[in-house]
Amino acid sequence: MRALVYWSINGIGGAQRLYVMFAKALLECGFNVDILTSHRISLSHIKSIHGVDLSGVNIRMIKNLPCTNPACSLVNSTVGMQELISISSSYDLVYLDDLYLSQFIKHNGVIFYIHGYTDRRRPIAPLAKPHRMLPMAIQALGSSYDIIKRAKYLFANSYVTAYVTYRVIGILPKVLHPPVDVKLASKYRSESREDSLVSFGRLGSAKGHELVIKVLRGLKDRGIDAKAYIMGSAEDMSAKAYVANLLKLAEKMGLAKQVELILNPSIDESYSILGRSKVFIHGKPHEPFGIVVVEAMAAGAVPVVPKSGGPWYDIIDRGKYGLGYGNLEEATNAAEHVLRGGYDDYSLLAMRRAEEFSMEVFKGRLCESLMGN
C-alpha cells in the first residue's frame, strides 16, 4: 500500500508539522510513504525543525522558481499541482489539505484534513494571512467544497472546526486532533523555571504576538519583573516587517531588554525555551486548534488562551487545564496568577492533558480509521 503526502506550504507551523506527523503515522501504519513538495527540504532539515525522524519516507522534489513573492508562489503552487495530478493515480491514499485542488484531483482514496473554519458557503481567501492573500485569493476563485464531500477519509482538527463545517455545509468530519511528540517535549522540562512568558507561532499580525509584550508591561506595572520570548518563522518581507514592529513596540513600552525575538528556531531551541518558561500566551482568538498550545503544555508551560476556538474548547476544556482570557486585563491577571504561585498546580494539569494529544494517540486513531474503512 502506497501513500502520498502533498506538502503544499513551507515554514515552521502547525500545518507543516502535521505533514510530518501524518507521514510518520502512515509509515508506522504500514504504508510506503512519499512526500511531494516544491520546497527545498530534506530528512535532516525535517528532524531539525520538527523533531521527527522520517527515515524510510521518500521525498519527491518538484522543480520550482527560486523566489518567495506572491506571484512566484502561485506559479510554484500550480506546477506542484500539475505534478500531483500526474502521479496521484499510482498511490492508494493521497493526503491533501488544499481546497483549490478539489477540481483537479479525482482520486478515490483522498484523505482530506480541514485545518480552518468552513464558515462560508464558498471558499474565500483568509484575510488573516496577508503574506499569502494574493495567491490564496486567486486560488479561492477556483476552489469548492467538492473534495470535502467526496473524500474517502475526512478529518477536522477540532470539535469546533467540525461543528462549524457541519453547520455551514451539512457535513460532519471526524475529529482527529493534531499530534505532539509529548515524549520529546517532556525531555526539555526544566526544574528551574524562569518568570517568563512565551509566544510561539508564525510571525505575523494574525497570530497576535504583540499581546505578550502588552501583558509583560502590565505585569511590570504590578511589580512583577518577568521576561518574554517571541518565537516563530519569518521567511518573507511581511514577517520581517512585523518583527520590526514588535521590536518598536517593546522599545516604546520600555521593555527592549526584556523581550527576546527568536526567528526560525530549531525544535531544540523552541522546546528548550518552552521547557524553562512558566507561561505560554496564545494571542490569536478563534484559532481552529492551536498545536503550539499543546507543545507548550507538554513542555510544562501553563497555557493562557483566548476564550474561543480549539485552544479553549478542545485543548484546555474551558479552563480545566489552563487559563482563558477575553481581554488584555484578563490575560494579565492570568499570567500574574501563574507567576505569583499558581504555576505548580496548573503545570501538572497541563502536562497530563498534553498526553491526550500525543503522537501515539494520533497514530492509533488514524490507523484505526484507515483500516476500518
Image: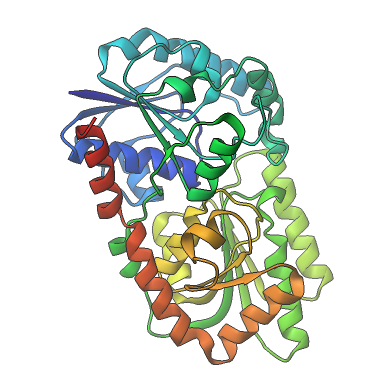
Q: Is residue 45 above or below residue 284?
A: above
Give x and y (percent) for residue 148: 48, 25
Count of marks overlaid on the render? 0
**Left or right relative to 25: residue 143:** right
Q: Residue at x 35, y 72 (%)?
A: 352
**Left or right relative to 243: residue 1:** left
**Left or right relative to 3: residue 49:** right
Q: The N terminus appears in which quarter of the rendering?
A: top left
Residue furthest right as drawn: 252
Q: Is residue 55 visible?
A: no
Q: Nearer the viewer, residue 161 or 280?
A: 161
Q: Is residue 14 above or below residue 146?
A: below
Q: Nearer the viewer, residue 372 or 191?
A: 372
Q: Residue at x 38, y 49 (%)?
A: 50
Q: Residue at x 49, y 31 (%)?
A: 171
Choose top left, top right, bottom left or bottom right for residue 119: top right
**Left or right relative to 149: residue 214:** right
Q: Is residue 90 visible?
A: yes
Q: Residue at x 33, y 15 (%)?
A: 108
Give x and y (percent) for residue 91: 26, 17
Q: The C terminus appears in which quarter of the rendering?
A: top left
Give x and y (percent) for residue 102: 50, 17
Q: Which color scheme does this rendered protein use?
A: rainbow
Give x and y (percent) for residue 135: 66, 23
